[in-house]
Structures are given as structure tokens and as C-alpha cells.
């Protein structure tokens, strides 16, 4: 169970994962050792899955962000596994979800340009034997960036 102090600690770490035990202690009004033990417990219990750097896609030359909906023509475990394996090999697909509704999958992709997105759709996704339809929405502007989870 998370208490209020755990929630405050998780919130602080989502905003800055580099906080030291000393800094966490100051923010939470705890000793550095108490703050460090709480962080370690939350890591051990799986509340904190990992730490990562957030990169700027435009600085990396990734000028096109899109959401790609994929509908399968056949829905069996073999087709789903095969499609998931394909998606797992594609570095431009940064996240993928299975959905209810018309689309079976939603992919978030970052590509160098429109030609790279076109190649992904027409030469990688559509030729897959289970895929019957692909629809893409190109992101014009992201006015709210990936926010921390509510704690």
C-alpha cells in the first residue's frame, strides 16, 4: 500500500529521476536515509519500473510523429503473435496498444519524414498477412507532452 509520503516521492521522481536521497529528503521533510529506503522499497515492489532519459525527437531528426491504427483481417493467436513480433522489430514504433472498437492496434511512431512513414505503412505493415487495413493520423502539434502518472 502507498501512503501519502510514497505518493509524494513518486511524484517528485517522475518530475526528476536524478534526485538524490538528500534532495528527496529535503523535499519530503525526511532524512536522506529514510528517503533512500522508501525509494528502494518502491523500486523493489515494482512501483518504479525503470529510469530513462526523455529525448527530443526533433533534435534527433524525427520530424514526423503519427498514430497508426491497424485492423487485422483474421483474429487468431498465431496472427496476433506474428504481428506483435513484427512490431517488436520496428524501432520507429515507440509504443503499441491492443484496442476495442474498429482498430485492433494503435501504434505511436516517430519517423524521419513522410517518406519513412509511407515506407512503414506500405512496405512493412500492409504486406503482413494478417493486416487488412491501416489508417494513420499525423501529429500536427503536441500541446501536452507525456505527463507524469497521477499518484
Image (tube, helix red, strand yellow):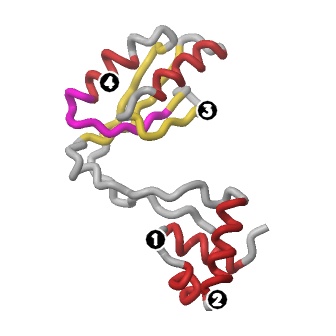
In this picture, is 66 found above or below 134?
Answer: below
Q: Is residue 8 magenta?
A: no
Callout in the foreground (4, 3)? 4
Q: Which residues are magenta?
A: 106-116
Q: CA distance from mark 4 to mark 2?
A: 50 Å
Q: Which residue is mark 1?
A: 18
- Percent across and percent down for residue 55 are 33, 54
Q: CA distance from mark 4 to mark 3?
A: 23 Å
Q: CA distance from mark 3 to mark 2?
A: 45 Å
Determine which quarter of the picture holds residue 111.
top left
Q: Earlier in the sequence, mark 1 or mark 4?
A: 1
Secondary structure, mark 1, is loop
- Percent across and percent down for residue 25 are 58, 86
Secondary structure, mark 4, is helix
**Furthest-top residue in this view:** 129
Q: Quadrant of the N terminus?
A: bottom right
* Mark 1 crowd level (few <14, some 14–19, many ≥20, 10 Å Cα): few
* Image disc number at residue 32: none
Q: Which residue is mark 3?
A: 100
Secondary structure, mark 2, is loop
Callout in the foreground (3, 1)? 1
* Mark 2 crowd level (few <14, some 14–19, many ≥20, 10 Å Cα): some
Secondary structure, mark 3, is loop
Q: CA distance from mark 1 to mark 4?
A: 36 Å
Q: CA distance from mark 1 to mark 2?
A: 17 Å
Q: Which residue is mark 4?
A: 120
Which residue is rendered at x = 36% and y = 18% of the image? Answer: 124
* Mark 3 crowd level (few <14, some 14–19, many ≥20, 10 Å Cα): few
Q: Is residue 112 magenta?
A: yes
The reply to whether dot 4 and dot 2 touch (C-beta < 8 Å) is no
Q: Which residue is mark 2?
A: 30
Amino acid at each position: 500500500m502507498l501512503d501519502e509520503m510514497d505518493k509524494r516521492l513518486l511524484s517528485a521522481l517522475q518530475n526528476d529521476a536524478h534526485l538524490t536521497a538528500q534532495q528527496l529528503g529535503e523535499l519530503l521533510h525526511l532524512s536522506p536515509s529514510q528517503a533512500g529506503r522508501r525509494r528502494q522499497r518502491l523500486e523493489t515492489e515494482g512501483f518504479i519500473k525503470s529510469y530513462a532519459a526523455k529525448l527530443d525527437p526533433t533534435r534527433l531528426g524525427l520530424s514526423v510523429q503519427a498514430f497508426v491504427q491497424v485492423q487485422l483481417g483474421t483474429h487468431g493467436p498465431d496472427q496476433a503473435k506474428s504481428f506483435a513480433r513484427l512490431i517488436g522489430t520496428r524501432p520507429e514504433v515507440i509504443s503499441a496498444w491492443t484496442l476495442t472498437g474498429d482498430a485492433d492496434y494503435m501504434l505511436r511512431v516517430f519517423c524521419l519524414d513522410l517518406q519513412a512513414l509511407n515506407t512503414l505503412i506500405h512496405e512493412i505493415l500492409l504486406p503482413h498477412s494478417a493486416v487488412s487495413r491501416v489508417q494513420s493520423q499525423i501529429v500536427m502539434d503536441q500541446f501536452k507532452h507525456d505527463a507524469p502518472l497521477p499518484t
